[in-house]
Amino acid sequence: MSQFPLDTESDLVEAVNYLLSGPTGSGQNFQGVSAVGEDAITSGPAKLVQTYFTGTPYFGPAITGFRSSAEQPGTQDDYADPLLLPDIYYPVWNTLPGGLPITSITPVDPTGRDIEITVTLGSLTNESQGPWANGQQVVITGVTPSTYNKTYTVVDFNPSSTTVPFDTVTLRSTETVTWSAYTSGGTAAINDFTLAKDQRFFTGNQAIVAVSGPGERVFITSQSGELIVYTYTKFVAIASYDPLIKFQINRYKAVATTTLPDSVDGRYYQGYEWAFDTTLVNLKKPVSWDLLGTQVYANPFTDVIYNNIIDNPNVGLYLYAFQIAQDAERDASPDDGAVLIVGARTTGVRSFTAQVIKN
């Protein structure tokens, strides 16, 4: 075994052989996640517990930015109720065009950061009746008084409630406000991403690794045993169009450290600010749709597996992630050209690993 300092010729020979052979193991720069989704486990007389993606890299309560050990990577277990179909309860990645109409707002304290809102949930087939997840951004507009019109974070809801629909949620403002009494109006938009650019949603299948030299490469493996992706598509007079979503392996680079909490879009995560770097894999998949936009479709995909992807980035800290993506909208009005990913569910085994190896 080589050692330092080198006291003898034998030590020198052993040290040179050690260097020429490369590292004794590559596990010192290896990260990943693995989990198994719940598949229709009965809870109560009718409800079925199932595992849904939250659409973010978020791993825990929005207040702290940390996940509990009981949570699976990037997911939450929620309900599907076969006796109340089409009532399905899954975290929403995108609110459908128009948002959710607000029926009431109640401040938790007269002066504070938290408010409780009640919304009217939609009536489309397969539209979520339990859209909430901790860490979502909710943008409120059109309320009288206008004090309530701002961006909030979901901090509390009751996914285990037996009351349906799940229309009430607690939101947190970024600043303390002296609230006026709610008068009327308003809509709530979940994760109000602009439709003018491509959108990439996290599945929790991701890993962070450090590349320390030009001779190092990164090997990535991603597996999802089954995905069911919920999509909403509506077009006006474009009957022959085939809408697509994309399964991607993307690379993000850490550009700065930060004390900000994890953000819903992945820009701030695990103490770093991340910038999108490149797409390593981009697999396009068609999804079901109807011309009038009367329902949300459940699109099944099985065995989404990528083995031995090889990347050779520059020196830096990188986040690799399996993501589900949608293109920017074709038309100016969302109702005239909308292809929205509104949620996703998983069953079976899913995993993601990234490993740095010296050439």
Image: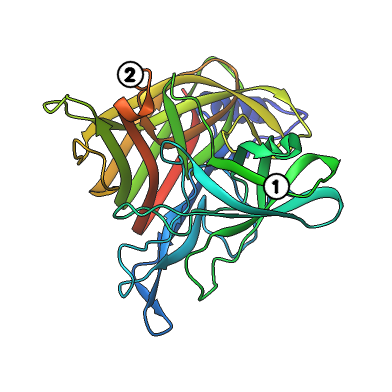
Asked whether residue 263 is in view, the answer is: no
Secondary element at tag 2: loop
Tell me, for residue 283, which label it has, or none: none
* Residue under pointer 1: 183
Location of residue 147 in the rendering, given as x and y in whole percent from the top left corner: 76, 37
Closer mark to the observer between disc 2 and disc 1:
1
Looking at the rendered structure, the kind of residue marked 2 is Asp
Location of residue 65 in the rendering, given as x and y in whole percent from the top left corner: 70, 47
Q: Is residue 306 left or right of residue 268?
A: left
Q: Is residue 181 above or below residue 263?
A: below
Asked whether residue 150 is in view, the answer is: yes
Q: Is residue 261 left or right of residue 234?
A: right
Location of residue 302 in the rendering, given as x and y in whole percent from the top left corner: 23, 50
Tell me, for residue 331, which label it has, or none: 2
Distance from label 2 to label 1 (Cα)? 35 Å
Which one is in front, 159 or 115? 115
Q: Is residue 109 left or right of residue 105?
A: right
> Which mark sits nearer the N-terminus, 2 or 1?
1
Q: How is the image coloured?
A: rainbow
Q: Quadrant location of residue 7? A: top right
Q: Residues within 10 Å of mark 1 (few under 14, many from 20)?
A: few
Number of callouts = 2
Residue in view at x 39 percent, y 43 percent: 342
Q: Quadrant location of residue 305? A: top left
Location of residue 235 in the rendering, given as x and y in whole percent from the top left corner: 24, 29
Secondary element at tag 1: loop
Residue in view at x 48 percent, y 43 percent: 55
Question: Farthest residue in the front direction?
Answer: 183
Q: Residues within 10 Å of mark 2 (few under 14, many from 20)?
A: few
Position of the N terminus, as image quadrant, is top right
Q: Is residue 281 above or below residue 277?
A: below
Looking at the rendered structure, the kind of residue marked 1 is Thr
